[in-house]
Amino acid sequence: MYLWVLRQNTAAQRFYLARGATCAEAATASPPGGDPARLNGTPGSLRMAWPDAARSRQLLDDR
């Protein structure tokens, strides 16, 4: 299981890391709805991944 988080959203990164995620990949963020006009510049994003989806759901539900 994985999700993408904006590189500048460090609070979300800490939240996911505390719940067992690892940073698996870095990329340029995709524009919302595929519309490049919705982005300001070229923000980065990180793919936060969990190896065990069942355990990940439990950790996220425990918040």
Image (spheres, rainbow, N blue to C red):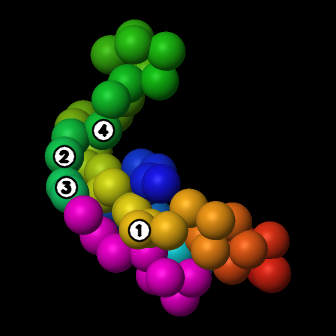
- Contact check, label 2 and label 1, Cβ < 8 Å: no
- Contact check, label 4 and label 2, Cβ < 8 Å: yes
Nearest to N terminus: mark 2 or mark 1: 2
* Mark in the foreground, 2 or 1: 1
Which image quarter: residue 53?
A: bottom right
- Quarter the C terminus occupies: bottom right
Nearest to N terminus: mark 4 or mark 1: 4
Distance (Cα) linking label 3 and label 1: 17 Å
Q: Residues within 10 Å of mark 3 (few under 14, many from 20)?
A: some
- In the rendered structure, the answer to whether residue 58 lies left or right of residue 52 reads right
- In the rendered structure, the answer to whether residue 29 lies left or right of residue 33 reads left
Residue type, label 1 = Pro
Q: Residues within 10 Å of mark 4 (few under 14, many from 20)?
A: some
Distance (Cα) linking label 4 and label 3: 9 Å
Q: Please give the count of numbered marks on the rendered protein.
A: 4
Distance (Cα) linking label 4 and label 2: 6 Å
Distance (Cα) linking label 4 and label 1: 23 Å
Residue under the point 24% across and 64% down: 24
Residue marked by disc 4: 29
* Closer to the camera in the image, 45 or 54: 54
Residue under the point 19% across and 55% down: 26
Residue marked by disc 3: 26
Residue marked by disc 2: 27
Rendered position, 6 above or below 35: below
Residue type, label 2 = Ala
Label 2 secondary element: strand
Can you tell which mark lies on residue 51?
A: 1
- What is the x, y in percent for residue 10? 44, 74
- Tell me where the magenta segment starts and ends, as one range: 17-24
Residue type, label 4 = Ala
Is residue 3 magenta-colored? no
- Contact check, label 4 and label 1, Cβ < 8 Å: no
